[in-house]
């Protein structure tokens, strides 16, 4: 499954000297190590809010609270739980300490809750800092010790500097501290790095040092998390590849993105794990192979020139299995040529559906019968990252109610009389890894809706007659010719399921409202036989028709006409299999409006009358006078 990568704090340490690089910096880095005053301005923001939070937590500046401190056993367990972080961070703590040794300071590593895990400090500062519990086991969250750099950085998810009297508790005002969170590849805060000291002035360089240290730890964690992967390392300036300012994209052997560091993520904000690396860099197979161990200029897909190399940890520099890398999504995707005739809404619907469903957000397509809902789904599947996985279509109106559960969720051997001896996996399991398309979802019986909802919430299926759930992972598209929100209002469709299905609602226009009918007719005729032209009169009649069956009807009419035509190279009025001059009359439009509204509301006359702005009795009367026999569904 494609997983969204996210970072809240994407500050990096790149600098730049050309306009392209300046753009790179704009896209990535707000702070620069060279501009400490800016950094401090950002890092000291939020003090007032932090003081309010400290008061709200019941703390008072001059009251020393009972100590929030873990005993030795609890600290040992906490260290075990944070083993990976500590292993990766310890060398960095030592490195940082070398840089601040002799300045009456200490370097601290805390967990994601602000409990200090490790400390490296000047012996002279030890005693003073011990007196305020600046040592392993102590919790420095805001709620325990009021405003302080560790608590503030964790609460606000960014670097923080707290100096002297800015500390909430009076006993801490001799300290000056700078802290910054450490995030894992998914952008979650997993710890924090802090430099604290006993100094009369704010230490501008301390903030820069902890940020550098944290970034180094993050990069190391990234590599520790994906030890078998390859790393594409890049920077706009070749000499900065391999430094802290570089972007790192972690890539699988098949050339798919696994993760990015914060700098890379700042370039590719919408990057998602599981997508081909060619979505982000313009790379042919040969070019990619040439990057192994060599710095080569390449372009990002948004046109920025960077210098990059690929390395694998402890790995011979053998190229990726390049053929698995797909061409960039854009090249095959964005035109939706088979839907694009002249009405921009249709291809745009395809583009929107693709983008959204690729983020694992379900899409609901509404439209009259034959408007091309299923075509749209096929076009989306073809371009999706799951194009080589199944597209499973379930027509919810066509499965008999008694078999629906078994059909959808599968069944175990011998689950019911007449069942297949070996059981069956069910359509949802068949869609695992691919796309599930629920057609005519508005017709799904309420009981089935409840079970489907559970599957969508828990992402696992229990077959009929079974007890063991099986995890499923599919992208979800649904379609209906009804107005699903009205069915919800009428209590015929579960509202919670509606919201589960309808991450994005796409409405396909009926043929009579499309602006590209002429072009569509010409194209469909040319697809059957490119040598045939449509006569003016035939085109006039086709354009005047009301097309209640939409594209399906048009397709049938054109195929029949082409088969019956008397001239080899022209389609004429006489060839058309539909009654002449179907220009809609006022009366026929009224009948269609009534029929449409009743169908949309699934036979609920009251709702249809409301939509049409007439009373229920008027609707009855007009249906009778139009001799329109519509079945009314009893409302439960
Ligand atoms: N873009 C298109 N170009 C040409 N023909 C199309 C296009 N889209 C759909 N059609 C034709 O219309 C028919 C109906 O399309 P489709 O099954 O996608 O409609 P639908 O909205 O899902 O219909 P229903 O609601 O009845 O299931 C297709 O079989 C095809 O013949």
Image (cartoon, rainbow, N blue to C red):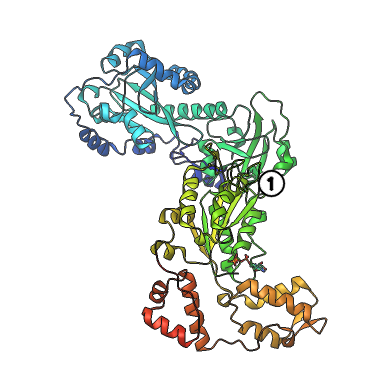
**Of 110 and 292, the residue lying toward us:** 110
Q: Residue at x 43, y 27 (%)?
A: 209
Answer few, some or many: residues within 10 Å of disc 1's Cα (few below 14, many 20 plus, some between 14 and 19): some
Q: Quadrant of residue 291?
A: top right
Residue 102 visible in the current orientation: yes
Q: Is mark 1 within 8 Å of ligand 1?
A: no
Q: Is residue 93 left or right of residue 261?
A: left
State the image coordinates of residue 382 (x, y, percent, origin top left): 66, 54
Q: Residue at x 63, y 76 (%)?
A: 517
User: Could you say whether the residue bearing mark 1 is in a helix, strand or loop?
Assistant: loop
Q: Residue furthest front?
A: 417
Which image quadrant shows ligand 1?
A: bottom right
Image quadrant occupied by the C terminus: bottom left
Residue 119 occupies which quadrant of the picture? top left
107 versus 240 height, above or below: above
Q: Is residue 433 left or right of residue 589?
A: right
Q: Position of residue 385 (x, y in %)?
A: 63, 48
Query: Would residue 14 be seen by someone viewing this image from the given angle?
Result: no
Q: Nearer the viewer, residue 315 or 339?
A: 339
Residue 80 location (% of width, % of height)? 44, 18
378 in relation to 53, above or below: below
The residue shown at (60%, 33%) is 239
The residue nearer to you, when weighing 483 against 354, is 483
Image quadrant holding the N terminus, namely top right
Residue 196: x %, y % from top left:
34, 22
Residue in front for this viewpoint, 339 or 392? 392
From the image, tell me which residue sits under label 1: 326
Q: Is residue 521 above or below residue 67?
A: below
- Tell me how many marks there are: 1
């Amino acid at each position: 499954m494609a997983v969204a990568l996210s970072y809240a704090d994407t500050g990096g340490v790149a600098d730049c000297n050309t306009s392209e690089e300046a753009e790179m910096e704009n896209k990535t880095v707000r702070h620069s190590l060279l501009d400490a005053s800016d950094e401090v301005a950002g890092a000291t923001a939020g003090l007032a809010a932090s003081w309010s939070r400290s008061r709200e937590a019941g703390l008072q500046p001059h009251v020393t609270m009972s100590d929030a401190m873990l005993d030795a056993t609890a600290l040992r367990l906490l260290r075990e739980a944070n083993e990976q972080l500590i292993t990766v961070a310890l060398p960095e703590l030592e490195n940082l300490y070398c840089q601040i040794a002799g300045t009456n300071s200490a370097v601290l590593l805390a967990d994601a809750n602000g409990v200090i895990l490790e400390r490296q400090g000047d012996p002279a500062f030890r005693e003073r800092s011990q007196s305020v519990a600046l040592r392993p086991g102590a919790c420095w969250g805001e709620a325990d010790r009021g405003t302080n750099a560790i608590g503030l950085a964790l609460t606000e998810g960014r670097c923080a500097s707290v100096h002297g009297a800015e500390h909430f508790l009076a006993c801490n005002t001799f300290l000056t501290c700078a802290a910054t969170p450490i995030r894992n590849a998914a952008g979650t805060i997993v710890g924090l790095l802090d430099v604290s000291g006993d100094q009369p002035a704010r230490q501008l360089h301390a903030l820069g040092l902890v940020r550098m240290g944290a970034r180094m730890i993050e990069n190391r964690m990234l590599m520790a998390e994906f030890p078998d992967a390859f790393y594409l390392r890049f920077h706009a300036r070749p000499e900065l590849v391999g430094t802290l300012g570089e972007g790192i994209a972690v890539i699988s052997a098949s050339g798919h993105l696994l993760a990015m560091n914060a700098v890379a993520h700042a370039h590719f904000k919408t990057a998602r794990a599981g997508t081909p690396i060619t979505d982000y860099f313009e790379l042919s197979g040969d070019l990619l192979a040439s990057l192994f161990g060599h710095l080569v200029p390449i372009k990002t897909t948004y046109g920025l020139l960077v210098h990059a190399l690929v390395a694998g940890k402890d790995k011979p520099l053998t190229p990726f299995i390049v053929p698995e890398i797909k061409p960039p999504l854009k090249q095959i995707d964005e035109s939706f040529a088979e839907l694009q005739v002249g009405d921009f809404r249709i291809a745009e619907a395809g583009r929107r559906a693709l983008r959204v469903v690729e983020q694992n957000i379900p899409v609901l397509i509404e439209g009259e019968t034959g408007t091309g809902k299923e075509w749209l789904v096929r076009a989306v599947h073809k371009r999706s990252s799951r194009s080589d996985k199944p597209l499973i279509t379930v027509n919810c109106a066509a499965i008999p109610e008694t078999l629906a559960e078994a059909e959808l969720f599968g069944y175990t051997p011998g689950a019911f009389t007449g069942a297949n001896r070996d059981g069956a996996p069910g359509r949802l399991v068949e869609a695992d890894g691919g796309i599930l398309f629920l057609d005519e979802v508005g017709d799904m019986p309420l009981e089935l809706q409840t079970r489907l909802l559970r599957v969508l919430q828990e992402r696992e299926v229990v077959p009929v007659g079974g007890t063991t759930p099986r995890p499923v992972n599919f992208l979800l598209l649904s379609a209906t010719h009804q107005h699903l929100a009205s069915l919800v209002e009428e209590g015929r469709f579960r509202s919670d399921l509606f919201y589960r299905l309808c991450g994005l609602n796409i409405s396909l226009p009926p043929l009579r409202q499309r602006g590209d009918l002429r072009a569509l007719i010409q194209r469909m005729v040319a697809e059957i036989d490119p040598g045939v032209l449509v006569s003016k009169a035939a085109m006039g009649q086709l354009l005047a028709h009301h097309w209640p069956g939409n594209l399906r009807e048009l397709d049938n009419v054109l195929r029949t006409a082409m088969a019956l035509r008397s001239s080899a190279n022209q389609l004429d009025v006489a060839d058309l299999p539909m009654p002449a001059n179907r220009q809609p009359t006022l009366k026929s439009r009224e009948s269609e409006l009534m029929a449409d509204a009743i169908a949309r509301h699934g036979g609920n006359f009251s709702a249809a009358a409301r939509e049409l702005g007439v009373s229920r009795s008027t609707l009855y009367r007009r249906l009778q006078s139009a001799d329109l026999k519509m079945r009314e569904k009893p409302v439960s």
